[in-house]
Image (cartoon, rainbow, N blue to C red):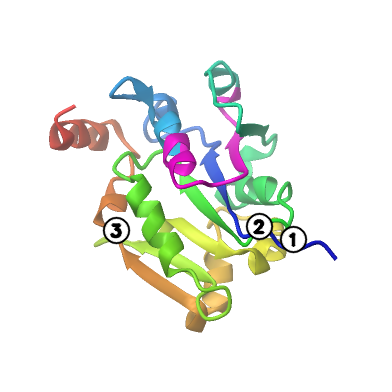
Amino acid sequence: MSEKIHTTAAIILAAGKASRYGSSKQLLQLNGKTLLEHSISNAIKIGCAPILVVSGAYHKEIAELSLPASVTLIYNPDWELGMGNSLACGAKLLDQESISSLIIILADQPAVTPDTLQRLTAAFQPIETSIVLSKNANSTGPPALFSSSHLPALCELTHDEGAKTIVSQYPDQTTLIDTPESAWDIDTQEIWQKFCEFSKV
């Protein structure tokens, strides 16, 4: 039996069409890097391995970026089925025996930092706390951490609600971490303009 390596994998979701925004919000520029590259950098800085980026509608554009060698880009041909399907697409490439947990990261949360992700990993306890969610004034959700014990269920997701169905089954093992920065979710151009003003980009 192989010994489990205590590492945290990262799945960065960048597959959507961003229809409400009107273009590839994953590729918006922030301080000289795309939002996707910022998400990748955050995962690298806290030592995530492996790091998987799931692309879809804008795969060609994302593939043209100079991504770090430690990052694996995965194209999900069924990206139109929603976030859950793209999450499953990435989860299927992870080995449950070689990781202890995985972090789900969205490529359109520009205020999330390595510290945000570090707070999630600090709250993780394999048995007592197997799910750690970000909480802000508007919602709970990504970035989110799941124990590798949930990997089989993540691989079976097919809907657009992400991993909410899994979370609902384990309320006693779920911890919420206050992350007001996760409220910045760039869904529209108006929100992006507000964020740029807020951050003085």
Q: Residues within 10 Å of mark 2 (few under 14, many from 20)?
A: many
Give the secondary structure at mark 1: loop
* Residue that carries the numbered disc 3 in the rendered image: 179
Q: Residues within 10 Å of mark 3 (few under 14, many from 20)?
A: many
**Residue at 67% from the left image edge and 51% from the top image edge:** 91
**Horizontal placement of 57 versus 23: left or right?**
right
Q: Is residue 56 magenta?
A: yes
* Residue that carries the numbered disc 2 in the rendered image: 99
Residues rendered magenta in the picture: 40-59
The first of marks 3 and 2 along the sequence is: 2
The first of marks 1 and 3 along the sequence is: 1
Inspect the image, locate mark 3, and give the three-letter code of the amino acid beneath it. Thr
**Residue at 14% from the left image edge and 30% from the top image edge:** 200
The CA span between labels 2 and 1 is 6 Å
Name the residue nearer the viewer: 160 or 177: 177
Residue 8 percent coordinates (x, y): 57, 54
**Horizontal placement of 159 versus 124: left or right?**
right
Inspect the image, locate mark 1, and give the three-letter code of the amino acid beneath it. Glu
Q: Which image quadrant is residue 149 in?
A: bottom right
